[in-house]
Image (cartoon, helix red, strand yellow):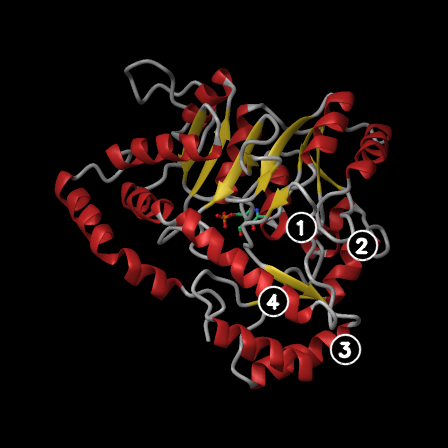
Amino acid sequence: MQFIDLITQKNRIRTSLMQRIETIVDHGQYIMGPEVIELEKQLAAYVGTKYCVSCSSGTDALLMPLMAKGVGVGDAVLTTPFTFVATAEVISLVGATPVFVDVMPGTFNIDPDLVAPAVEAARAKGLNPKAIIPVDLFGLPAEYDRLEKVSDELGLWILEDAAQGFGGTFRGKRAGSFGLVGATSFFPAKPLGCYGDGGAVFTDDDELDRLLRSVRVHGQGDGDDKYQNVRVGINGRLDTIQAAVLIEKLAIFDDELVERQRVADAYSSRLKDRLQVPEVPSGYSSSWAQYSLLAHSTAEREQIMEALKQAGIPSVIYYRIPLHLQKAYEGLGYRRGDFPLSEGFSERIFSLPMHPYLEEAEIDRICSVILTA
Ligand SMILES: Cc1ncc(COP(=O)(O)O)c(C=O)c1O
């Protein structure tokens, strides 16, 4: 059994995808070809923002807005320690300081009530808090109504980490469209993934869109001379062939979201009396990047994961070490006990196979192994 089945999906789109790839091989615009422009239009329309700037990964999609906004040494950017390392890594890469804020029980997303005290503590240390990066963890958008209110009050702007959230919604708005700017990843395992690395940035802000396009190509200027560099940038472009893959996958994405929801519902109805199943509060929908359960203890998690392994069923822990306890972030001075919810989740959480092509019989088998473990 696969943790994520990309083969069945590939078989579904293979004919039209191969035609598109052949067109690109023949037209020869391998970088910034017409498919990239077409994809950006489609993605902006899908997410509901004025602009979409495609790029080379979800990490660059987070990095580019920080660079474009001039975040740097002496600045603080708030985020959660219960996320993939890239969320905090980009803050460090621009020379700013990550300031961690614990998550909420139930949704695993950043707790808006803890943002103001963290800002105060950062200011007391002489840092200048500029922005907040809420993460749409496992596919569920963070609590943007409260986050937007608190960030307005504190003078922060929001960079939404929708790397996992793409396809999720909150009050009818799609993930990627919250805050000043949103970032997503098209890593193959993501809800919308390409066949390599890829990402995109979303915004309604004209000036930010202009800056992002410049940062994406080595800080090039607006003029005709592409070798005129007006700011420090990166090589952050999305390959044309990856854009073609994404155009084909976007066409079946809504249908796949329905299937992901089917799988999540089936898991939750069978497992809810045995383990803590993921919560989707009213007004939200998840893209189910991961279906993550909480065991009652680390020992129980190990027992269930071992039983799954014996049955040939893959399961994965996201995330075993919260970022404030990672060696790379030792220098920030955090200690065990600083973020009790993140720490507690990392000791008990595990994720089950999740993809749109998981069959009822497979779901039954996974659940019966868990229920008898
Ligand atoms: C929450 C989160 N942020 C950022 C990233 C980075 O995306 P990428 O791997 O495309 O650079 C990921 C991807 O794994 C992620 O899960």
Q: Residue at x 51, y 82 (%)?
A: 312
Quarter of the image that includes the C terminus: bottom right
Left or right: 363 in relation to 306: left
Q: Splitting the image into 4 quarters, where does residue 352 fall?
A: bottom right
- Residue under label 3, please give it: 299
CB under 8 Å between discs 1 and 3: no
Amino acid type indicated by mark 1: Val
Foreground disc of the pair 4, 2: 4
Question: In the drawing, does residue 178 fall left or right of residue 204?
Answer: right
Sequence order check: which comes first, mark 3 or mark 2? Answer: 3
The residue to which callout 4 is attached is 267
Image height of 349 relative to 214, above or below: below
The residues tagged by marks 1 and 3 sit, at their Cα atoms, a distance apart of 26 Å
The mark that comes first in sequence, 1 or 3, is 1
Q: Position of residue 204 (x, y in %)?
A: 51, 22
How many other residues sit within 10 Å of disc 1, few (<14), some (14-19) or many (≥20)?
few
In the picture of the structure, the residue carrying the numbered disc 2 is 341
| Residue 367 in which image quadrant | bottom right
Task: Tell me residue 299's x, y (percent).
Answer: 76, 77
Q: Residue at x 71, y 25 (%)?
A: 156
Crowding at label 4, few (<14), some or many (≥20) Cα neighbours within 10 Å? Answer: many
Cβ atoms under marks 3 and 4 closer than 8 Å: no
* Mark 1 lies on residue: 280
